[in-house]
Every structure is written in C-alpha cells, then in structure tokens.
Image (cartoon, rainbow, N blue to C red):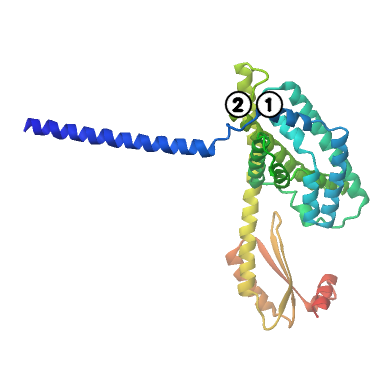
Amino acid sequence: MTNNAQESAESTNSENESADSSRKNLLNSFRDFLKHYLSIQDNAQPEQTIEGIERDIPFKGFNLWILIPAVLIASFGLNANSTAVVIGAMLISPLMGPIMGFGLSVGINDLPMLRRSLRNIGIAVAVSIITSTIFFAIIPLNDASSELLARTRPDIRDVFIAFFGGAAGILAGSRKEKNNVIPGVAIATALMPPLCTAGYGLATLQFSFFLGASYLFLINAFFIALATVLAVRYLKFPVRTFLDKKVEQRAKLWLGIIVFVMIVPASIIFYQVVTETIYKRTVNQFIEENIHYKDDAIVKKEIIITDSINYVNLVIFGETIPEVTITTWQETLNKQVKRTKLRIFQNTDREGLPEVARLVDMYT
C-alpha cells in the first residue's frame, strides 16, 4: 500500500510539474508575441528625433510668417463657421514644434532647450492672440458661430485627445519612415482655433470666451508635452543632464500637481455637459410625447439653461391653445424635470413679439 501511495504521489507531482511547465511556456510564448508585435523601441532614432524637434522650436523668420497667415485663415474659418477652413489652418500652423520641444526638453533634462521652448511658445501665443484680436476687431461678427462656441468649454475628453495625440506625434516623429501622423495630430488636438477664439473674446470683450479658449489651449499644449515626456523616457532617449534625486522628486511632484489642476476643472465641465445633455434629451422627449394640440405646428424650440431656473420656449403656429392645456403640459413637465418653466408663444402674440411675427410669416 505504501509503494502504491508513493507512486501515486510521484505521478501527481509529475503532472503538476508538467502543467506548470506548460503554463510557463504559454506565458513565455504570449510575452514573446506581444514583444514582437508591440515593441516600439527597435526602430526608434533618438538623436535624429531630437535634432528634428529642435529645428522646429524657433519662432522667427519662416515659422513666424507661416503662423500669421495660419491665424488669419483660422479666424476667417471661425468667422464663416467653416470647418474645412479651420482644418486647413490647423494643418498650416507650426505650433506643434515648440510644444513638443518643451516635452522633449523635460524628458531628457535639457534646460537650455526648455528655456528656448517656453520662450517660443510665449512668442507664438502672443502673435496668435494679437493677430486674431485685430482681425475680429475689424471684421464684423454679430453672433458667435458653432465653431467658436466649440472652443469655449473644454472638458475631460479634450485631455485624452491631447494626450493620445501627443503620444502619437512623438512616436511617429521617432521613426525614420515618413508618415502622415503629425498632420493628423495637428487636426485632432486643435491648437490654433482656441487661440483665435481667445482673440475673439478680447476683441468683443467677452472674457468668458477668452478664458475658456485659453484653458483649452493650455490643456492641449500641456498634455501633448506630457505625452512627449513619457514617450521619450520610455524610449530611453539620451539624457543631457542628470538631476539630483531630490530635484527630480520635486519636479515629479509639481508635474503631478499641474496634471491635477488641469484635469479637475475639465472633469467638472464634462459632468456639467453630460448633465445638460441628459436634461435636454428628457425635455425633447417630453415635447415629442406631450406637446400636441389639433393641427398646430412647433416652428421654433429653444431650451435655455440658467443657474436659477431653466426655460423651454416653444413658438407654435395654429389655433389658439387654451390656458388649461398649457397648465397641464407644465404639470407633466414638472414631474420629469425640476426648475423648468414652459413658455408657449402663439401666433396671437405676434404684435408684442417681433420674432414670433417673423417666424409665423416665414411658416405661412
């Protein structure tokens, strides 16, 4: 019996060792597979990449004269609400150079390059805002277009777009082969339009536009630079200066603080955007399901959100709607959303409200 027990134990141990060996082989094979297909270090060319980025840092001569037309083209696109023109301006703009130079200098501890990058970013930003401010002060624009409004409320999505765009840009820049990644990054991260929107805010004294657009530019520039820092560290670019451990820890602490300061407001704005989207979806569903009276037609719908109370304005053409029906609609709306007042404007209000009269005439 003892011999049988020993043989059974040895057989079990042998099976366990065989299973462990199979698992190890499988894990090794999977790791080799990932290393073969996902490795980005083999084809990296650090020295050539550093030289290329350094060439694009200075904002003088050619780069400066390219920047000014790019600003004007972007401003015309924002003025005309033309997405295609704005995209063209983003492709022309040379703003990526000093921003990636800033990230590279931090990644390789090159203080002279860091100073040059910051100085040239400052020059580029100043020239862009001054040019766009002069443009919008001269060219009339009554209402802010959707292209302008899109650059005034950055949120957490812009953080991720800038970070992954910056990562794609530095990884593409580290390759020997030519590719079209950098133009794609320039379009995705949208550095030029926020500066033009900031100029519009100054020209029209709408400082909420200036602050929102400036914040969007800061988000884009900072997270492009942060992605560049992480990429060059991962690719083991040659470090120019070795920092003291305490200095390096202090730099990491400040970097973390800046990331936190950038992300928190963007996250709050994103929450507000999601909340407003859900609110508007609920209101639109309420209108579709409840606002019906005989053959009347809704010729204009407007949802106004304020800090105290929200308004749902509806201009309705047709037979006069009884007050009791409007009261019933309001009570139904109150059950679905809070702090919302339903305001119905009918064709009988045309004498007191010129816009209602114009809409009724257009509908007729």
Query: Callout 2: helix, strand or loop?
Result: loop
Query: Residue drawn at (82%, 49%), measured in percent from left and top?
Result: 74
- The residue closer to the viewer here, 323 or 357, is 357
Q: Amino acid at mark 1?
A: Glu
Q: Nearer the viewer, residue 216 or 86?
A: 86
Asked if residue 207 shows in the view, the reply is no
For the question of whether residue 88 can be seen, the reply is yes
Q: Identify whether 361 is placed above or below 195.
A: below
Q: Residues within 10 Å of mark 2 (few under 14, many from 20)?
A: some
Q: Earlier in the sequence, mark 2 or mark 1?
A: 1
Judge whether 364 appears above or below 43 on screen.
Answer: below
Q: Amino acid at mark 2?
A: Lys
* Residue 330 picture location, percent across and down: 64, 70
Choose top left, top right, bottom left or bottom right for residue 267: top right
Q: Which mark is residue 198?
A: none
Asked whether, in this view, residue 236 is left or right of residue 12, the answer is: right
- Dot 1: element: helix
The spot of residue 265 in percent (x, y) is 66, 42
Horizontally, residue 204 falls left or right of residue 109, namely right
Q: Quadrant of residue 124?
A: top right
Instruction: Tell me the residue that label 2 is attached to.
Output: 236
Mark 1 Cα within 10 Å, few/some/many (few <14, many 20+)? Answer: few
**Residue under the point 58% across and 66% down:** 335
Judged by depth in the image, the label closer to the viewer, 2 or 1, is 1
**Residue reaching furthest to the front:** 177
In 3D space, how far apart are the residues under numbered discs 2 and 1 (Cα atoms)? 11 Å
Q: Determine the residue positioned at 74% across, 34% down.
A: 99
User: Which residue is identified by label 1?
Assistant: 47
Residue 333 image offset from top left, x and y in percent: 62, 68
In the image, residue 40 lies at what x, y percent?
58, 35
